[in-house]
Image: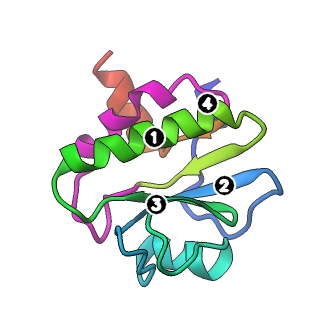
Amino acid sequence: MLRNRITPEYITELSENEIFVFGSNLAGHHAGGAARIARRKFGAISGQGVGLQGQSYAIPTMQGGVETIKPYVDEFIRFAQAHKELTFLVTRIGCGIAGFKDEEIAPLFVDALEMDNVALPESFIEIITEKE
């Protein structure tokens, strides 16, 4: 069952009900990495660093340590739970320009692992399930 909920490594298009989940900065400068893709292809709004925008959802990752990212991931999980009609494709947020390791970010998504409408990167799933 988990194989169906793995985020593709490269996302170039979305179905109508799919949302591209990316790491951003609080100022919403979507200039590089997945944030740039979100702005160019999936409706991310310059100046909006958090939440749903177009067919994308921003989770801030550039404001400090992992502890500053966790509240935004928790907020995302609550949002996804409330919007089961949407499928959320979580990218490796924080693991590019922000400089975190998958091992640091993946545990933040443990509560999303069993959600039918959230796909996670394969590396996140491997890390989370190793700890169980």
**For mark 1, does the 10 Å Cα neighbourhood hold few (<14), some (14 to 19), or many (20 or more) residues?**
some
Q: Which residues are magenta?
A: 93-116
Pointer 1 or 3: first along the chain: 3
Residue occupying image coordinates x 45% and y 40%: 75
Label at residue 52 = none
Pointer 4 or 2: first along the chain: 2
Question: Cβ–Cβ below 8 Å for labels 1 and 3?
Answer: yes
> Label 3 amino acid?
Val
**For mark 2, does the 10 Å Cα neighbourhood hold few (<14), some (14 to 19), or many (20 or more) residues?**
many
Q: Position of residue 116 (x, y in %)?
A: 66, 28
Residue underneath mark 4: 81
Observer-nearest of 44 and 124: 44
Q: Residue furthest top?
A: 132
Residue underneath mark 3: 50
> Label 1 amino acid?
Glu
Q: Is residue 10 above or below residue 69?
A: below
Q: Residue furthest right?
A: 16
Left or right position of 132 against 9: left
Assign a secondary structure to mark 2: strand
Distance from disc 1 to disc 3, alpha carbons, whole Å, reads 10 Å
Left or right position of 41 against 114: right
Question: Cβ–Cβ below 8 Å for labels 3 and 2?
Answer: no
Q: Is residue 11 above or below residue 109?
A: below
Residue underneath mark 1: 75
Nearer the camera: disc 4 or disc 2:
4
Pointer 2 or 1: first along the chain: 2
